[in-house]
Image (tube, rainbow, N blue to C red):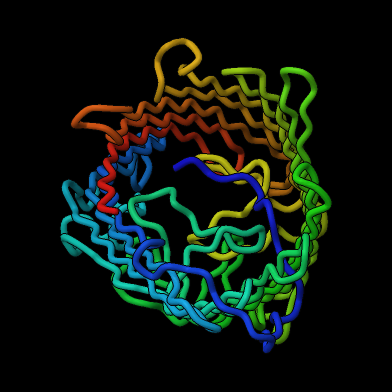
Amino acid sequence: MQKLPLARVCALSCLAPIVTLPYTVKADFIGDSSVRLDMRNFYFNRDFRQDAAVQSKRAEWAQGFMFNATSGYTEGPIGFGADLYAALGVKLDSSDARAGTGLLPNAFGDAGPGEYSDLSGVFKAKVAKTELKVGGFMPKSPVLLSSDARLLPPIYNGATVVSRDIDNVLIDAGQFRSVNYRNASSNHDDFLTGNYSASSDRFNYASAAYIFSPQLTASFWRAELEDVYQQNYYGLLATQTLGSWNLGGNLGYFDSSQAGAQRAGKIDNGLTSILLSANLGSHTWRLGYQDNRGDSPFPYLADADPNVANVVQILDFTRTQERSWQARYDINMAGYGVPGLTFLARYLRGDGFDVAGSDAKEWERDLDVSYVIQSGPLKNFGLRWRNAMVRSDAAGQLDENRLILSYTVVFK
């Protein structure tokens, strides 16, 4: 699915204090609730373009169901609420020769389970403008971005505190102790790492964002995968209107190093991420740049996406010493009388990294067409085609197609 840009707001390295002054939460437990069912039919085909390869392609088909029920808060000095999440993934087609797409459990093919599921929820309490939540989460932050690029998203289990009690300041902190991966039915105590062969059973983060104005936000995040890596993020998000143009800039810098027992060895990485945008009516142009410095690749959690500018359909351009740039164009056809129809095209190129002692390079080209029915009995039914082509000295040659049918039923 479409990957998101760097998070808009972030938090400080301490938990928000409990507010003791008298305060009544103005909320409605039932009135502020919502209930919806999201259905996703997903076909995935990746061609490795190698006749003599052990596996020439991966191709699977699956159906997903995601039920979400979110409550409001009870009234009183402390408001209480609860959310429920239930998901089911069903195998429609697979084989031993074509397994491993990430849509279905592991890489079992015909021998694998015919379905997998997840049942989770969140208990929440609110005092003034501070919220405590305990349960299963899909984080969307610079230091942990739950990926929605397959049939079901991964769920991270733990506790978070978010506070807006200080004017223009957003504070966010939390700890996760287990994860239900995107193609699994049970929780795993170990968080695996992307770009490294290491794991840990605890992920901590804390952050703060200061909102200078609706057009400018600065943020700092601190994260640590215990005994593996620690990471600081410094971000700036800016928007500006100039006549009919809407301009945007998303600038971030990640400083990552080893932590504790150093299970992944020494880590030395500094990654600069820049994404600029310009919108005029139905048209949006974007330019991205990524500079990955130090002697190590960028560390992040497996089944999550690195939340940087040039993470796209297949590649993430986070190899040691890799520099990359991106050019992207989006068009929304609502301005031309076809609401619900959108299209994007982008090209990315990376170089400066090493493969077998030689300078290497890689590129990816993506096309994405999406249509969502706007009215009538099939309102909210969506059709999306995602096509990608990769030529890489490290990853080889890849051609990929994803066809996604989606439908949402809103009960409340």
* Image position of 344 (left or right of 384): right
**Residue at x 81% of width, y 54% of height:** 218
**Residue at x 44% of width, y 43% of height:** 1
* Placement of the C terminus among the 4 image quadrants: bottom left
Residue 206: horizontal and vertical position, in percent?
A: 70, 73
Q: Quadrant of residue 403?
A: top left
**Residue at x 53% of width, y 44% of height:** 3
Residue 374: horizontal and vertical position, in percent?
A: 33, 27
Residue 254 visible to an observer of this rendering: yes
**Residue at x 31% of width, y 31% of height:** 383
**Is 374 situated above or below 405?**
above
In front of the other: 168 or 234: 168
Residue 50: horizontal and vertical position, in percent?
A: 40, 35
**Is 255 situated above or below 259?**
above
**Is 102 situated above or below 286?**
below
* Image position of 311 (left or right of 79): right
Residue 367: horizontal and vertical position, in percent?
A: 48, 25
Q: Quadrant of residue 121?
A: bottom left
In front of the other: 67 or 197: 67
Q: Residue furthest top?
A: 336
Count the marks: 0
Residue 135 visible to an observer of this rendering: no
